[in-house]
Image (cartoon, helix red, strand yellow):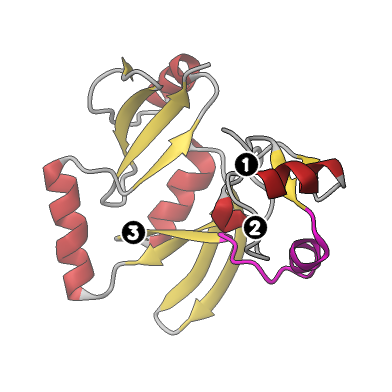
């Protein structure tokens, strides 16, 4: 990626710093930069202040619909190895979250009760069509596949190389297919 003239000048006066994430024009909150290269981030006063105060939008919760929250909690903790975070009664259901002990800090998966008829129809249609509800990442799909298979997890085939990833679908026992993915090195 090529920097425009303003970005070249800005880079020379510390408006950018190295970081581990890919950054594009949308990541620059001040709107003055474009084509920010990989491993660089705008750190002008406007952008840096917003980053420090948390004004930017973040993903902290993702959800998966489950047909039984208790069974889901058991599967996601006992089998997958996630950790229960929140378990708050809310009428007939619970605000129930889990996270991966090796995953991104502060990110939780909500085990969302599928108590709404259209949501049940949607979940069943995805399952019947073989469409995963979400994907989980692993660094060693071969060993994770064997570990989960030993624990009785039902897979839809074996891990398959698909170019930039190796992936396999499994059933979460709660009405969903989950894509287990290992990015290519």
Q: Residue 136, percent across and down?
A: 45, 38
The quadrant holding residue 45 is bottom right
Mark earlier in primary sequence (3, 2):
2
Residue at the image position 29 percent from the left and 32 percent from the top: 169
Query: Eyeballing the image, is 50 above or below 81?
Result: below
Between the residue at mark 1 and the residue at mark 2, the CA separation in whole angstroms equals 26 Å
Given residues 98 and 7, the one toward you in this image is 7
Q: Residue 57, percent across and down?
A: 59, 66
Q: Is residue 48 magenta?
A: yes
Q: Which residues are magenta?
A: 43-60
Given residues 56 and 89, the one toward you in this image is 56
User: Which mark, by number, is residue 66?
Assistant: 3
Q: Residues within 10 Å of mark 2 (few under 14, many from 20)?
A: many
| Callout count | 3
Mark earlier in primary sequence (3, 1):
3
The residue that label 1 is drawn on is 103
Between the residue at mark 3 and the residue at mark 2, the CA separation in whole angstroms equals 37 Å
Mark earlier in primary sequence (1, 2):
2
Q: Residues within 10 Å of mark 3 (few under 14, many from 20)?
A: many
Q: Residue 99, percent across and down?
A: 59, 50
Q: Which secondary structure, mark 1?
A: loop
Q: Residues within 10 Å of mark 1 (few under 14, many from 20)?
A: few
Asked if residue 110 lies left or right of residue 156, the reply is right
């Amino acid at each position: 990626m090529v920097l425009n003239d303003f970005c070249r000048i800005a880079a020379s006066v510390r408006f950018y710093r190295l970081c581990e994430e890919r950054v594009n024009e949308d990541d620059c909150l001040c709107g003055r930069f474009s084509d920010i290269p990989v491993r660089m981030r705008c750190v002008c006063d406007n952008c840096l202040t917003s980053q420090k105060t948390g004004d930017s939008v973040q993903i902290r919760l993702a959800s998966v619909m489950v047909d039984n929250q208790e069974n889901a909690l058991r599967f996601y903790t006992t089998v997958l190895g996630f950790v229960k975070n929140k378990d708050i009664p809310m009428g007939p259901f619970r605000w129930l979250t889990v996270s991966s002990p090796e995953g991104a800090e502060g990110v939780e998966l909500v085990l969302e009760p599928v108590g709404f008829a259209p949501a049940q129809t949607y979940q069943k249609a995805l399952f019947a069509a073989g469409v995963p509800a979400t994907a989980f990442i692993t660094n060693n799909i071969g060993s994770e596949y064997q570990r989960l298979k030993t624990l009785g997890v039902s897979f839809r085939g074996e891990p398959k190389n698909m170019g930039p990833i190796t992936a396999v679908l499994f059933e979460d026992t709660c009405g969903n297919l989950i894509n287990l993915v290992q990015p290519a090195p």
